[in-house]
Image (spheres, grey):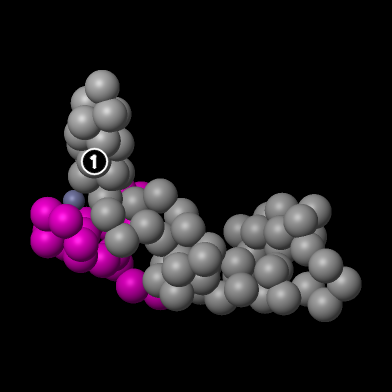
Amino acid sequence: MTPEDRVRAAAARFDDDRGELADRAVAALVRRTASAGQECATCGRLKPFSAFSPDYRRSAGADSRCRSCAAARRTARLLQRG
Ligand SMILES: [Zn+2]
């Protein structure tokens, strides 16, 4: 089973008849594997895609913040709420 097959199979469980979600998920996977990484929107450092959470709703296929920035933001928000 290729990574594409796995993404397709996973998306199929949530998908409607047209298979749009599976197509978008596979396209995002291809984009993520085509390039070495992306710049984090918060710390601005170029990091590999493994440093970002996958997010199929975004065109890049990954979160715009790296995992450590996303975690810092979550913690900050929790502290803000008290
Ligand atoms: Zn970052």
Query: Is residue 64 shown to the viewer in this render?
Result: yes
Tag 1: amino acid = Arg
Indicate yes or no whether the magenta region holds residue 25: no
> In the drawing, does residue 64 fall left or right of residue 20?
left
Asked which secondary structure carries label 1, the reply is helix
Q: Quadrant of the N terminus?
A: bottom right
- What residue is drawn where x is 53% and y is 63%? 56
Quarter of the figure that contains the C terminus: top left
CB at disc 1 and ligand 1 closer than 8 Å: no
- Percent coordinates x, y for residue 54 in the rendering: 46, 54
Depth check: 35 or 12 in front? 12
Looking at the image, is 76 positioned above or below residue 32? above
Q: Residue at x 21, y 59 (%)?
A: 40
The residue most toward the front is: 81
Residue 75, relative to residue 63: is it above or below? above
Which residue is more in the foreground, 31 or 78? 78
Percent position (x, y) of residue 58? Answer: 45, 68
* Residue 44 is inside the magenta segment: yes
Write down the region rendered in magenta: 34-51
The percent coordinates of residue 65 (x first, y second) are 27, 54
Residue drawn at 23 percent across, 41 percent down: 73
User: Which residue is found at the position 41% from the left and 61% from the top?
Assistant: 62
Residue marked by disc 1: 73
Q: How many marks?
A: 1
Image quadrant assignment for residue 76: top left
Q: Is residue 33 visible?
A: no
| Mark 1: few/some/many CA within 10 Å (<14, 14-19, 20+) | some
Furthest residue in direction top, as rendered: 82
Q: Who is closer to the viewer here, 58 or 28?
A: 58
Q: Quadrant of residue 7?
A: bottom right
